[in-house]
Amino acid sequence: MEPSSNNTRNNPSRQRNVWVPWLKRGVTILFFILVVVLLFSMIRNVDWNAVFETLRGYSLTLMLMGLGITAASFIVFSSYDLLGKFYTGHEIPVQKVLLVAFVCYAFNLNLGAWVGGIALRYRLYTKFGLSVATVTRVLSVSLTTNWLGYMLLAGVIFSLGLIDLPEHWQVGMLGLRFIGAGLLLVCLFYLAACRFSRRRTWHLRGNEITLPSLRLALLQMVLGAVNWSLMAALVYLLLPQDVFYPTILGILLVSSIAGVITHIPAGLGVLEAVFIALLQHQLATSEILAALIGYRALYFLFPLVLACLVYLFLERWGSRRKGSGYD
């Protein structure tokens, strides 16, 4: 045991590797505590009767429009895996790919990326005959598509200063513009690499990484941006109509990063804290909370119920056809 201890003390890189995970956990816990404190301080004086009155005021037409936006968003997100099908050339039929992607997205939103985005994808796709390496490549296309769309929208909104921030946040507007410009440069770099790079394939930890064509890269960026825009459109629909849509989109993008940092499933509490902090100078807190409750019901909970039923169907379908080839 002593030589091992001496090696750790004498190797600075190993010492850093020991402390890095603990540092990450500490930052996550601190951020989580700050979010809880911030949210509590914001909602402790909320008029919950006003929240429920706002919810009761939503018309059937409005809710149906919200369901339509939700359906469109889930279709767009599910098409990320169709790009993965094109990228890898696997033979799973389109309808199966869309169903698997739908289930994974719904579980991802509510239970976190490790459950929906990763574990379920591997389980369902391998049941339908894909190798682990192929599933990894499909997953990489989906993740890249999502975050390329994020960077494109955030880059435009932040660099142009389209978020209507509270007055005491204006000091940070210049920094936000620089972040936006940096995100747009990353998008341009990715497109340039897909178009001009002579080396197309790399190997990382046993996995093969191949740059897509420029056409596929552009499709990734467009589909990712459309999905984020639809998510924001649903929140916008449920809020009073005098709110600037790019502000809602920008706040959603900020809250999503905060949710990733805290690792809280569904960003529970994080979404509310960020929206209240950045919109309370324009809207009543009761109106913001009512819109976010409606958003969670339409975009998170309702699709999750459907996804549970579809998941059971896919499990049975995969078990019946395992080893018998594709449809």
Image (cartoon, rainbow, N blue to C red):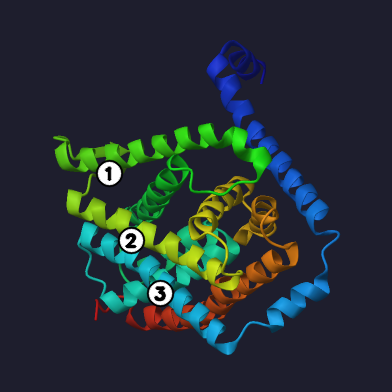
Name the residue rendered at 36%, 40% in the picture: 184
Lower sequence index among marks 2 and 3: 3
Q: Nearer the viewer, residue 40 or 144?
A: 40
Q: Amino acid at mark 2?
A: Leu
Lower sequence index among marks 3 and 1: 3
Within 10 Å of disc 2 (Cα), the crowding (few <14, some 14-19, many 20+) is many
Q: Above or below — where is 7 with respect to 63?
A: above
**Of all residues shown, which one is farthest toward the top?**
10
Residue ID for mark 1: 209
Whether residue 300 is visible, yes or no, is yes
Query: Residue 72 has which mark?
Result: 3
Dot 3: what SS? Answer: helix
Name the residue rendered at 59%, 52% in the picture: 255
Q: Amino acid at mark 3?
A: Ala
Quick one: quadrant of the N terminus? top right
CB contact under 8 Å: marks 2 and 3: no
Name the residue rendered at 72%, 48% in the picture: 35
**Of all residues shown, which one is farthest toward the right?**
45
Q: Nearer the viewer, residue 279 or 97?
A: 279
Q: Above or below — where is 264 with respect to 74?
A: above
Labels 3, 1: front one: 3
Q: Nearer the viewer, residue 206 or 158?
A: 158
Query: Residue 223 has which mark?
Result: 2
Asked which quadrant contains residue 134, the reply is bottom left
Dot 1: what SS? Answer: strand
Q: Amino acid at mark 1?
A: Ile
Quote the CA–CA distance across marks 3 and 1: 30 Å
